[in-house]
Image (cartoon, rainbow, N blue to C red):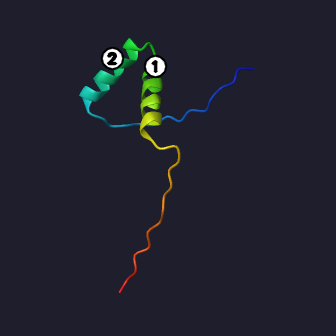
Amino acid sequence: MTNQIKKQRITLFIDPSIAKQAKAQSVVEEITLTSLVEQALVKYLPEKTIIKKIIKKLG
């Protein structure tokens, strides 16, 4: 049995020129567009994201 990684399909709306450049770069690097976007997000995002709830006092 192969070791398959779960993936989630998402839809994004991005500038067409960015999409075109990303597609071209994925060809240059000989990787899929999915891999290129995943690598870019991993480099951009912090290791952990902590979301704090801010409670606004009324009155």
Secondary structure at numbered mark 2:
helix
**Looking at the picture, how far across and down is residue 7, in whole percent?**
56, 32
Snapshot quadrant of residue 54: bottom left
- The residue under the point 46% across, 26% down is 34
Q: Earlier in the sequence, mark 1 or mark 2?
A: 2
- Label 1 crowding class (10 Å Cα cut-off): few <14, some 14-19, many 20+? some
The amino acid sitting under disc 2 is: Ala
Residue sitting farthest toward the bottom: 59
The residue at which mark 1 appears reads as: 32
- Above or below, 14 against 22 in this view is below
Is residue 51 or residue 14 the one in the foreground? 51
Give the quadrant of the N terminus.
top right
Residue sitting farthest toward the right: 1
**Looking at the picture, how far across and down is residue 56, in whole percent?**
40, 75
Is residue 57 or residue 15 the one in the foreground? 57
Is residue 14 or residue 26 the one in the foreground? 26
The residue at which mark 2 appears reads as: 24
Q: Which mark is residue 21?
A: none
- The residue under the point 45% across, 41% down is 45
Is residue 28 or residue 32 the one in the foreground? 28
- Label 2 crowding class (10 Å Cα cut-off): few <14, some 14-19, many 20+? few
Secondary structure at numbered mark 1:
loop
Give the quadrant of the C terminus.
bottom left
Left or right, 21 with reference to 36 = left
- Above or below, 17 against 27 in this view is below
The amino acid sitting under disc 1 is: Thr
Q: How many marks?
A: 2
- The residue under the point 41% across, 14% down is 29
